[in-house]
Image (tube, rainbow, N blue to C red):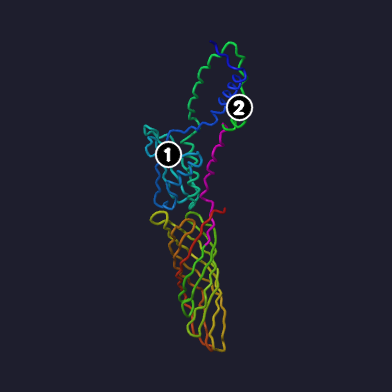
Amino acid sequence: MRVVLPLHRTASGLFVAAVLGFVAPARGEPSKVPPWRLEYVRAPGAELCPDKKELRLSVASRMGYDPFNDAATRTISVTVVNTPKQLEALIEARDEKGQIVATPKAWAPSSRCDHLIENAAVFLVDIVDPGTVPQPPTAAPPPAATAPTDLPPPAHPVEPPPAAHAAHREDPPPPRPSPARSPWTPQLMVSISAGVAFMAAPGVAPSFTLGAGPRWSLFSASFEGRYDLPGRDGTRVASQLGVALLPCVHPRLYGARLLLEACISGQIAHFWLEAAGTNETRFTDVAFGVGLRGGLEMRLGPVRARIGVDTIHYDRAAIIRLDGTESWKMSSVTVVLRGGIVGVFDVF
């Protein structure tokens, strides 16, 4: 006996099958490329840069998943180094046979490890998924069942909803790293220090400085203001306010974190001199001086710690007179011990 399906039930079934056939591919999982093994090394001087985990997170945030697996046969090696000019990430990719397939290099300004990791992640995404990996083939549809001869023709295919097309839009390519910074472009250096001055007053005088100027990898030139609080010895008191020009060199010592500082200085100083309790209570004087500075700097990210010694020779000695006679005379060479911090910033 032949069974004939009702017309309205057959047409409804064909309509639902057509809609599901278009929507199902849009719900598929995005294809993933074969995994890579990530090797990450921070060379001496780059220990403060982010670790391997931060680089993996940066790549995963761009791709939507983590493409690295420690058991993978393909490797990407990233070595972070701190050069005299900039931070660099040396990248080397090897295939399953150990052959080198890519050797890009990312860079960032000194002390900007966060920028270096982001730039390196851009190169790693290009290596891991360059956009040419084929998508998995789509399964062939099963053969259509033979419909009874007395059924009406099938319904017309239903157009997929707009959302199905939107799901296949490609993401925009990641941004490329910015061009390399010229080694002749200076950074802005700002410094502040505190210390004690000897032989510049009757007693030990607290001394403070504030400076600013351009700085390159090896050289710097800054203007520095100085103020010494009154140093006293009984009734004799002396203080000074001055400004100096300091050209300096900053060679590296024992890696990239420790630097030597060597400067020459030329300055002008205004002195206030006092002999309390006499009929000649206050004097002022102006002197010119030249000197040398030697010290050390320790990198602490964008900020650096500094210790140093200043020696200054003045063209004339400040004198305190008591009742018309010389009571105290400044030494021709003064010494200041200082400690402070230095900030180096990319503003040019």
Disc 2 to disc 1, how far (Cα)?
Answer: 36 Å
**Label 1: how many residues lie within 10 Å, few (<14), some (14-19) or many (20+)?**
many
Label 2 belongs to which residue?
160
What span is in magenta?
168-190
Numbered circles on residues, count = 2
Provide the major secondary structure of the magenta segment.
loop
The kind of residue tagged 1 is: Phe
Front residue of this view, candidates 306 and 1 = 1
10 Å crowding of disc 2: few (<14), some (14-19), many (20+): some
Comparing labels 2 and 1, the label whose residue is closer to the camera = 2
Q: Is residue 14 above or below residue 163?
A: above
Residue on which disc 1 sits: 68
Q: Indicate whether 259 appears above or below 50.
A: below
Mark 2 or 1, nearer chain start: 1
23 left or right of 202? right
Residue at image x 50%, y 24%?
Answer: 138
What is the three-letter code of the residue carrying label 2?
Pro
Give the x, y percent position of residue 213.
Answer: 54, 60
In the current view of this chain or complex, which residue is farthest to the front?
A: 1
Residues under numbered marks 2 and 1 in contact, where contact means CB atoms less than 8 Å apart: no
Residue 254, which numbered label?
A: none
Which type of secondary structure does the marked residue at label 1 adopt? loop
Q: Is 127 contained in the magenta span? A: no
Give how far across and how far down residue 338 sits, in percent.
Answer: 46, 68
Q: Nearer the viewer, residue 176 or 279?
A: 176
Q: Position of residue 291 (x, y in %)?
A: 48, 68
SS assignment at label 2: loop
Question: Looking at the picture, does residue 145 appear above or below residue 117?
Answer: above
- The x, y position of residue 33, in whole percent, is 46, 33
